[in-house]
Image: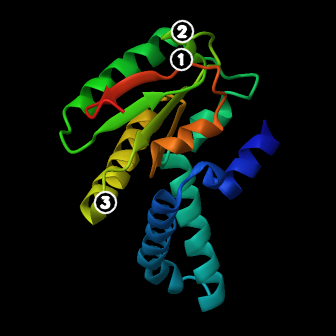
Amino acid sequence: CAFILAVNWCLQGMRGMDRKELAFRLGLELVVAAILLPMLAWMLPSGAACVAALLAAHTASFTLNGQLWVCARYCRCYGRDPRLLDAFLQRTAVALHGRPWLREAVCIGSLGRTGMTHGDRADLDVRLLFPPGLRGWLRTNLLLLRLRAHAFVAGIPLDLYAYERPERLRRFDQRERLLVLLDRDGR
C-alpha cells in the first residue's frame, strides 16, 4: 500500500496521459508552485522554498486530481460500496451530456464489460476525448480537474484521462467492450 502510494505520488498517472493533458497538468503544478513560493520564501532559504513549493504543488495535484482514492483501493483497509460508484458514474454521465462541446466519453475495464461496478475495491475507468482546438483543450482539462476534485471529496476512485484520438483506446484489451457514455458523432 505504501509503495503504491509513493510510486503514484511521484508519477501521478503520467504514463496514461496524452501530451495535451500532461502539458496542462505540469503547467498547473508550476503555477501553483509559483503562487506558493512567496509564502514559503519568507520562512525558508530560497532553494528550500523552491523545493517545498514544488513538493506542495505536486502533493496537492496528487490529492485533488483523483490519484489518492485510485491508489488507496490497493490498501487492505480500503472498501467502498459499489452502488456509490455506480451512482457517481450516473451523475457524471449526466454532467458530461450537459456539455455540448464535449463529443465523446467511454468507460473501460470491468465497467465496460458489465455496465456495473463489482466489488468494494473497484474503480471507475473513464476516458474523454479532446475536442479540437485550444478552447477544447482548456475546457476538457478544466473538466478533468473538476471531476477529479469532486471524486476526491466523494471518496470515489476515479481513473480519468482524456485522449487526443479514439485510436488511443486500442491500447486496452480489445476483447473488452467499451461502455459508451457519450458519442455525439457516432464514432
Q: Do the residues labelled 2 and 1 touch (CB within 8 Å)?
A: yes
Looking at the rendered image, the disc whose residue lies closer to the viewer, 2 or 3, is: 2
Is 64 positioned to the left or the right of 96 in the image? right
Q: What residue sits right under mark 2 in the picture?
A: 114
Is 128 positioned to the left or the right of 5 in the image? left
Q: Which of 2 and 160 is in front in this view?
A: 160
Sequence-earlier tag: 2 or 3: 2
Inspect the image, locate mark 1, and give the three-letter code of the amino acid beneath it. Leu
**SS at mark 3?**
helix
Distance from Cα at disc 2 to Cα at disc 1 = 5 Å
Q: Where is residue 153 in the image (x, y as percent from the top left)?
A: 42, 35
- Please report the residue visible at 52 percent of the width from the left and 79 percent of the height from the top: 40
- Please report the residue visible at 45 percent of the width from the left and 79 percent of the height from the top: 34
Residue lying at the far right in this picture: please name it: 3
Circle 3 residues within 10 Å: few <14, some 14–19, many ≥20? some
Q: Position of residue 148 (x, y in %)?
A: 43, 41
Is 49 positioned to the left or the right of 31 in the image? right
Quadrant showing the C terminus: top left
Inspect the image, locate mark 3, and give the three-letter code of the amino acid beneath it. Leu
Q: Which mark is residue 75?
A: none
Q: Where is residue 143 in the image (x, y as percent from the top left)?
A: 33, 46
For residue 25, say whether it is visible: yes
**SS at mark 1?**
helix
Q: In the figure, residue 55 lies in which quadrant? A: bottom right
Q: Where is residue 138 in the image (x, y as percent from the top left)?
A: 31, 60
Q: Residue 111 carries which label?
A: 1
Q: Do the residues labelled 2 and 3 touch (CB within 8 Å)?
A: no
